Image (cartoon, rainbow, N blue to C red):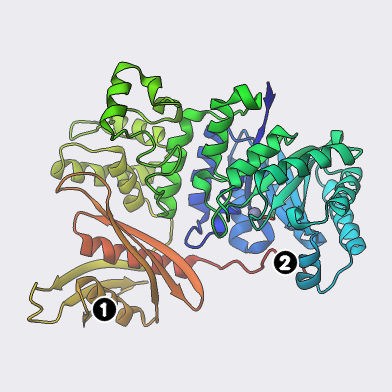
Amino acid sequence: MRTIKIFDTTLRDGEQSPGCTMNTAEKLQLAKQLARLGVDIIEAGFAVASKDDFNAIRTIAGEVEGPVICSLARAEEYDIKRAWGAIKDAPKKRIHTFHSTSAIHLLYQHKGMSQDEALKRSVKAVKFAKSFTGDVEFSPMDATRTDTGYLCEVLEAVIEAGATTVNIPDTVGYIIPVQFGDMIKEICDKVSNINKAIISVHCHNDLGLSTSNSLAAVLNGAGQIECTVNGIGERAGNCSLEEVVMALRTRNDIFKADTNIATEEIMKSSRLLTSITGMSVQPNKAIVGANAFAHESGIHQDGLLKEKTTYEIIKPEDVGVSSTKFVLGKHSGRHGFRARLKELGYELSDEDFKIAFKVFVKLADKKKDIYDEDLMAIVDEGVKTVYEYYQLLDVKQSSDMHNEKKPSAFVKLKIEKTDKEANAEGDGPVDAVYNAINILTGIEIKLLKYEVEAITEGPKAIGRVIVIIDFNSKTVRGSGSHTNIVIASAKAYVNALNRLKANGTRKVSLLNKE
Ligand code: KIV
Ligand code: ZN
C-alpha cells in the first residue's frame, strides 16, 4: 500500500478566501490541530505577503512539532530569503517556490516573457532555495493550461536543479479527471528524472472536480495531494482534505493507497476552522456537513437498524462524529472543562483559561446542558485573539412591531482609554446599533455580510452573528455570540473593527515581480 502525503494549505491558499483571514494566534491554534490530524506538511503562509504572514509562519515553525513547515515564495531571491527566515527554526522545513508556465500567464501576467526565460527563472529559484534547505518544492503555476511538452521540460530542469517535490497546480480549476490522470501519466513517462521527486497535485474546485482530479492523479502516480480543511480556498476553493482522505481510506481496494491522517480528528479540525473563520460548512457537504451522517428516509432508517452497512459507507466515529453528544453542566469542574476544550483542539494559556472558565460558569447557571458548540462559542468570546482597541461597554435598543417609533439604539464604547456614547436610529435594531457604532468610530464601513445562527438547540441557545465588513477595500470578518442577538450583532461588528485596526492586508499578489 502506498502512503500519499497530505500537504495542507488551509493557512495559505485557504486563508486567501474572502473573510477567512486569520491572525497569528488563530493560525497557531489551527496549525496545532493540523499536527494532531497528522498532515505531513503545513503550508503556513506566504512569508513575503506581509509582516503578519511572516510572523505567523515563524511562530508556527517554532511551536508546532510533527509536520514539515513550509512557506510559499515566488521565484525571486527576496521572497525565498523571507520564506527561509520564517521557517528556519522548524525541525522540518520546506520552501515552496513557483513560476507561471502557461502561455496565457506568460503573455499577460509576465508581459510576454518567453518560455525559455520562465524556465531559467524557475531553475535559478530552485537552486537558490536549495542553498537554504534540502526540501524544495516547485510549482509551474497554471500547469494544466501549459503545453505538456514544455511542462515536462520545466519539471526535468527543476528536478535537476534540486527540487524534491514537483507540484502540478490546476490553478483555475479547468481540467477534468480523465485528462488530469493522462497528464500525470505523461509526466511519469516523459520526465527522465521523475523518480528523484515526488509528484504533487494542487486542484481548485471551479468545476466541482478538485477531489476527483486529485484522485485521478493518485491513480496515475501522484504521491502528494495539496488540500484544505473544509475545502476553503480561492474562489470555489481547493481540494477538500476530508474528501480525498476518506475516499482513499474507503476505496483503498481501488487506490491501493492511504495517508497518515488520524481520521478521527477530521470533525474537530473542521469545526475548529469554522469557529475561527466563521465560514460555515454547507449541511450536505461530504464527510463534515451536518447532514453527512443523518438518515431521514424511513427505508434507510429501517435498513440501518437492521445492519449499519446497508446505508453507511463510513462509520461516523471514524471521522470523529460521535452519536452521543458530549455534555458538560454546572457541576463539571475546571478539570472536565479543560479536558473537553483540549479534546476540541483548544489549548489555552492559564490566563485565557481563567476567563473562559468564568464565562462557562455564568452560562452553566443559565443553561442546564453545555454542548461542544457552546464551548467553542465560549472560547470565541472569552479568549481575545485580537487587541481590543474598541471595547463594547453597553448596548440598549428600542423597537416595536408596528414601527410607531423608528428603531433606535444607544451604544457605549471604550475607544483606547476613553469612554464614548452615541444614540442613533436605523431601519431595525441592528441597523440602529451599527449606525451608533459608526458615529463613535467615525469610520465609513460597508457591511458585506450579516449572518445569524443558533449555535445550539432550544430557546436558551446562544446566537452567533458573523459579519464581513469592508473599509477601503480591506475585507475583515468579525463574530460575536450572546443569548441576545442584538448584543451578539454589536459584538460581531466591534470584533470586526478591532480586526480591521489590527490587521495588515496582503501586500503582494501571487504575481511574480518583473
Ligand atoms: O493555485 C495555484 O496555482 C497555487 C500555486 C501557488 C501553487 O496556489
Ligand atoms: Zn492554489
Name the one closer to the observer, 421 or 459: 459
CA–CA distance between discs 2 and 1?
A: 41 Å
Q: Residue beneath label 1, please?
A: 436
Name the one closer to the observer, 248 or 368: 248
Q: Position of residue 168 (x, y in %)?
A: 74, 48
Which picture quadrant has residue 150? bottom right
Lower sequence index among marks 2 and 1 = 1
User: In the image, what residue type sits under mark 1?
Assistant: Ala
Name the residue: 40% across, 42% down. Answer: 289
User: In the image, what residue type sits under mark 2?
Assistant: Leu
Label 2: state its secondary structure.
loop
Q: Is residue 437 left or right of residue 468?
A: left
Q: Position of residue 224 (x, y in %)?
A: 69, 37
Q: Residue beneath label 2, please?
A: 511
- Is the shortest distance between ligand 1 and the CB of mark 2 under 8 Å? no
Name the one closer to the observer, 22 or 108: 108
